[in-house]
Amino acid sequence: MASTTIALGNEQRVARLYSYPNDPTNPGAETLSDTVLHWTNQTLERDGVKAKGVTASVSIDGDNYAIVLEGPDGTQSHLDLYADRIPQFFKHGEEAMAVIEQVKTMKKDPPWPDWAKSSDANCKWNPNALWDPQGTNQWYFFLPMGMAMIHQKSLQFFHYPPVRLLTSMRDYLDDPVPVRWVELLEANGVATEQDAWLYSTVMDGAPIAAPDDQGTIYPPEGQTGQAQHLIPIQHFHDYQLAQVNLLLNTFPGNDKYTVPIVVYGTPARDTFNALYKVELSIKKNPTITLEIIPGKTTPVICVGHPYRFYAQAQSYVGSGSIVPGECADAVEIMKEDLVVARWQHLMAQDPTQDPKTVLADCNSYWRDDAHAATVCKLVRHEGSLWYPDPNSLEFQFKVSLDEAAAICQKNNNQTCEGLS
């Protein structure tokens, strides 16, 4: 029998690290132990070790909490990896919490434009509304929990997590963005959702859960000014460097390489460039290699945020239908994202390849009319994203993949044909 015990600290520390209670509107819904177990079990499942018989429990000794992992003979190496990584993961999180306390006291320079502010200055994140300018009362500390953290095949660098992943979904990957990316990976040869989870470990630059529209906001109609990035990702460089180093696995087939990194969206790309003194850009320099961990080469690629497909295709995200006049541009975004998902999959299989050559091959693959049916199917399916109740943000797709394939076949794979 294999086993390990991972000390988490006292009740106050554990509650802060796990953002307990996850649902502030229903604080008695579960115990702190239940919350720890919830996120731990998701990680075990997505790492594939739950299927090997590894189980988790929580022990409490006085005021101190610990995760107890047990498994059959042959799983001790997995448990040892968790025993090494989980304490470091939370140490980095605790350091990020200290940064948040500093950020709360800072003045925004330059100050927020008037159109970005709320008249309600009594917001949760900062009583002076310096870092929650719109007064949403919905900014919470949230570490990237519940994902693969020992067997991941790539690392995904994003900006920040939507708050509903903490308070409603209770799942970092139960969101239209990671769900969409899993479908793109599966379209590129990743066999199952279980395997796709190993490509889906997220490293958000800011451990701050906030509403979807808090990442970047734009001047309202009739107002002038530049887009504003509300989440203060620029203050977490030490946290970002530490967590990337921790979660960036060495490639099993060659210890001089690591698994690849995909960087999504402008704030994440700007931050990544600042961290590693590089110049990633979608148009001119989308892929590079870096020595993030001494002696190891890491292939990196950047792409627009996966959410932009939904924003382009629909009149408002979650409407359930594609706007005919926006369909052609949505098709182009779909192809661009499929190219990057293919690159991610191929480079994860063998990161010793030249990343630029692989990217060129991926472009050729998805620009070939032989794959028009897949492009059409994904656009029609994902373009049907629907929020039945926008207040809950539970989502579904009105058109299944099979139904989308039938529509595309009927229209000779002319993606935008027959929209109304």
Image (spheres, helix red, strand yellow):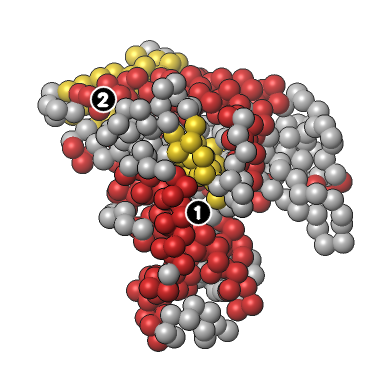
Q: How crowded is mark 1: few (under 14 residues within 10 Å), some or many (20 or more)?
A: some
**Residue 310: mark:** none
Residue at 33%, 42% (x, y): give it. Answer: 350
Residue 376 located left or right of residue 324: left
Q: Which of 286 and 394 is in front in this view?
A: 286
Kind of residue indicated by mark 2: Leu
Q: In which quarter of the image is the C terminus?
A: bottom right
Q: Nearer the viewer, residue 358 or 410?
A: 358
Kind of residue indicated by mark 1: Val
Q: Quadrant of residue 377?
A: bottom left
Of pointers 2 and 1, the one earlier in the residue sequence:
2
Residue at 30%, 38% (x, y): give it. Answer: 47
Res. 196 visible in picture = yes
Q: Where is residue 113 in the image (x, y as percent from the top left)?
A: 85, 44
Q: Position of residue 226 (x, y in %)?
A: 80, 49
Q: In which quarter of the image is residue 354?
A: top left
62 above or below 285? above
Residue 118 located left or right of residue 175: right
200 above or below 13? below
Q: In which quarter of the image is the N terminus?
A: top left
Spatial separation of the CA atoms under disc 2 and disc 1: 30 Å
Q: Where is residue 319 in the image (x, y as percent from the top left)?
A: 58, 69
Q: Name the residue under label 1.
A: 177
47 above or below 336? above
Residue at 18%, 37% (x, y): give it. Answer: 52
Q: Name the residue under label 2.
A: 79
Res. 381 visible in picture = no
Q: Residues within 10 Å of mark 2 (few under 14, many from 20)?
A: many
Q: Is mark 2 on a helix, strand or loop?
A: helix
Q: What element carries label 1?
A: helix
